[in-house]
Amino acid sequence: MVSKELRQQIEDYAAQNRRRVVEDLKALVRIPSVSRRGEEGKPFGEGCAQALDKALEMAEGHGLTHRNCGCRYGLAGFGEGDKTIGLFCHLDVVPEGNGWIHSPYDPVEKDGFLIGRGVADNKNAAVLSMYVLRAFRELGLPLRSRLQIFFGCSEETGMEDIESFVREQPMPDFSIVPDTSFPVCHGEKGIFGCFARCGRPWSQILSLSGGTVENMVPDSARASLPMHPALLAELRLTAEKAQGISVAAQGEEIVVTAAGRGAHAAMPEGGDSALLRLFRFLASVPAIHQGDREICAFAASTMGDWYGEGLGIAHEDAPSGKLTCVCGVAATREGRLELHYNIRYPVTHRGELVREGLEKAFSQAGWEVLHLSDSAPMYLPADDPKVRELSRIYHELTGRDATPYTTGGGTYARHLKNAVGFGMESPWETGLPQGHGGIHQPDEAVSIDALEEALKIYILSVLEVDALLHS
């Protein structure tokens, strides 16, 4: 337990560095570091290379060791010891998108918030991590471990950065990933990808497509059929009784469009799949070729629930709840239907069981499974001493509920051993219009008070984890 005097010292340090944290965060946000395929020497593009250079320049200014690892990631460190505590953050950001009130790369302060792309996801963590290490150097805090910061450059685009780190560097003994919401995220579901193709081509349907990314419930879908007056009339009549379906004549084709509601694949319950609407509608129209209706009926059966029941892969556990299954993308290639699924399976489940269930379901229906991918779960039990200690610190400093939780999302933690997600994304009341202020939204915002609070939380957490590693 940290003494009163030491805790006061940490609180004073956080207050004294509040303005510096904000200004350093502004400096990083001014660099548009959207990760994209780059050139030799800058594998994730010019913006990410510049952001990494800036972060390492800041690390040098804080008196930290630092190195650039091929512009894929950077490392900064302080201290010595036979144990290592890692702090993992990323400098790349999602594209700015549309609808901003404020300029995405010209950060502004308003009503106690800092606004700009990356202020919350995840450049705040990069800046705070450096001030954590600086605190140990400047205040002479007790430390027997080596502290290491990871600055990633492709977290938003496949995590090639952390994969390179795992291949090239020793694994820390414990890692904190500040890329979730507080309190402690002690588990991330496994993420399974499946790409399946129908074994026979369409007979009448000319094309069918929907969705844009695998990890989202699709909000739109469309199919085209050859023009025939009787078919057009029947489709229109059936569409009058079907929610979210429209039918239009376009030259020599009939176009059927379905509208739904998007949601992230990790939390699909609030979504409404446009693909499911479309498949159910097409399967119900007798004038459509029977073989095509059978294809649509099978496709609908695989996505008629959010939990993989139609594919025979449903599973749940106590720590993380139910498996979720979303068909995010449909396409027609060479006349055959292709479906892309994103599956989040419970933390105590095994990916090979998901694979076996998928292969069985699709083979029995005459479909091919062309590609399977598996990102294994991350899980530390809620009663792990480090999880308990971080939860205690968070509760003592904030007074808020500190019950550890699991998520269907994915962070660097799933690539590490003995890692947890720990802040500092939060749904702050920013005063901005709805749809603004959150991560990945226009006018992304972070509370400046929360930055100061998080700095104290992270310094105390590293102190206690260091003590646990050497107990």
Image (spheres, rainbow, N blue to C red):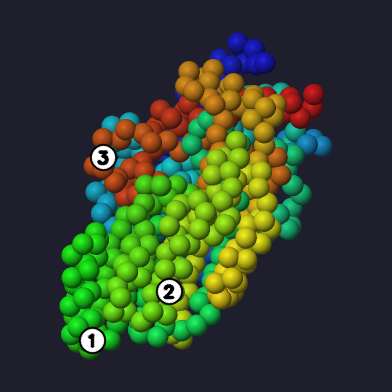
Residue 12 lies, in percent from the top left, at 52, 19
Give the Cα distance between marks 1 and 3: 48 Å
Give the Cα distance between marks 2 and 3: 48 Å
Mark positioned earlier in the residue sequence (1 or 2): 1
> Along the horizontal axis of the image, is 439 left or right of 343?
left
Mark positioned earlier in the residue sequence (1 or 3): 1
Question: Which residue matches tag 2?
Answer: 294
Mark positioned earlier in the residue sequence (2 or 3): 2
State the residue in front, 403 or 220: 220
The residue at 32%/69% (across/down) is 284
Mark 1, mark 3: which one is toward the viewer?
A: 1
Give the Cα distance between marks 1 and 2: 21 Å
Kindly identify the amino acid type of the residue bearing the numbered disc 1.
Met
The residue at 62%/16% (across/down) is 6
**Whether residue 86 is situated above or below residue 356 in the rendered picture:** above
* Mark 1 Cα-neighbour bin, 10 Å: few <14, some 14–19, many ≥20: some
